[in-house]
Image (cartoon, rainbow, N blue to C red):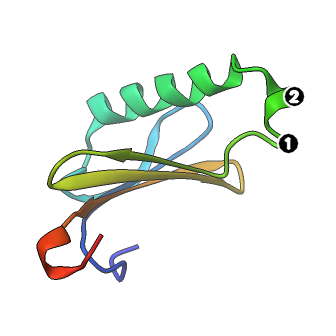
């Protein structure tokens, strides 16, 4: 996870939202973990017929950074990345 370009922090959560691993800006960030799990739970209330298998990646974009959330192997992976559009780095 530390090798992702532009990454300023990450969280790895279990299915219940407990922090398994973290680093950088998101180190031991339980508040963000609760918010992210709430977003994931919200997506489960959306009509699954509209989506084949639910989401694979969820991005939350702000002016200068974004959060990328992926589900894999019964874990939730969250990466916080810097956005530098001026230099062509999304």
Horizontal side, residue 75 vs residue 46: left or right = left
Above or below 45: residue 16: below
Residue drawn 62% across the image and 37% down it: 15
In-image side of 74 versus 17 (left or right): right
The quadrant holding residue 89 is bottom left
x and y percent of residue 87 in the render?
Answer: 15, 80
Q: Which residue is mark 1?
A: 52
The reply, left or right, for residue 41 in relation to residue 32 is right
Q: How far from the left and from the top, in percent, is residue 83?
A: 21, 64
Q: For the point 31% across and 34% down, which residue is it? A: 32
Decide: few, some or many residues near mark 2? Use Cα within 10 Å; few <14, some 14-19, many ≥20: few
Q: Relative to the observer, which residue lies in front, 68 or 29?
A: 68
Q: Secondary structure at mark 2?
A: helix
Q: Residue at x 87, y 28 (%)?
A: 49
Indicate left or right for 87 with 59 as reference.
left
Q: How far is mark 1 from mark 2, CA to CA?
A: 6 Å
Residue 49, disc? 2
Q: How many marks?
A: 2
The residue located at (38%, 35%) in the rendering is 33
- Vertically, is 62 above or below 47? below
Q: What quarter of the picture does the N terminus occupy?
A: bottom left
Numbered circle sitting on residue 18: none
Mark 1 neighbour density, 10 Å: few (under 14) some (14–19) many (20 or more): few
Q: Are marks 1 and 2 in contact (CB under 8 Å)?
A: no
Q: Nearer the viewer, residue 29 or 88?
A: 88
Residue 17: give x, y in percent of width and height: 50, 33
Mark 1 element type: loop
**What is the residue that sits farthest to the top in this orientation?**
45
- Quarter-of-image position of residue 21: bottom left
Q: Which quadrant of the rendered structure holds the C terminus?
A: bottom left
């Amino acid at each position: 996870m530390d090798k992702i370009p532009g990454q300023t922090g990450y969280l790895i959560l279990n299915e219940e939202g407990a922090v398994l691993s973290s680093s950088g800006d998101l180190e031991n960030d339980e508040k963000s973990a609760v918010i992210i799990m709430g977003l994931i739970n919200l997506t489960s209330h959306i009509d699954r017929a509209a989506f084949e298998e639910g989401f694979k990646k969820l991005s939350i974009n702000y002016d200068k950074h974004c959060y990328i959330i992926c589900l894999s192997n019964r874990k939730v992976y969250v990466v916080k990345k810097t956005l530098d559009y001026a230099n062509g780095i999304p």
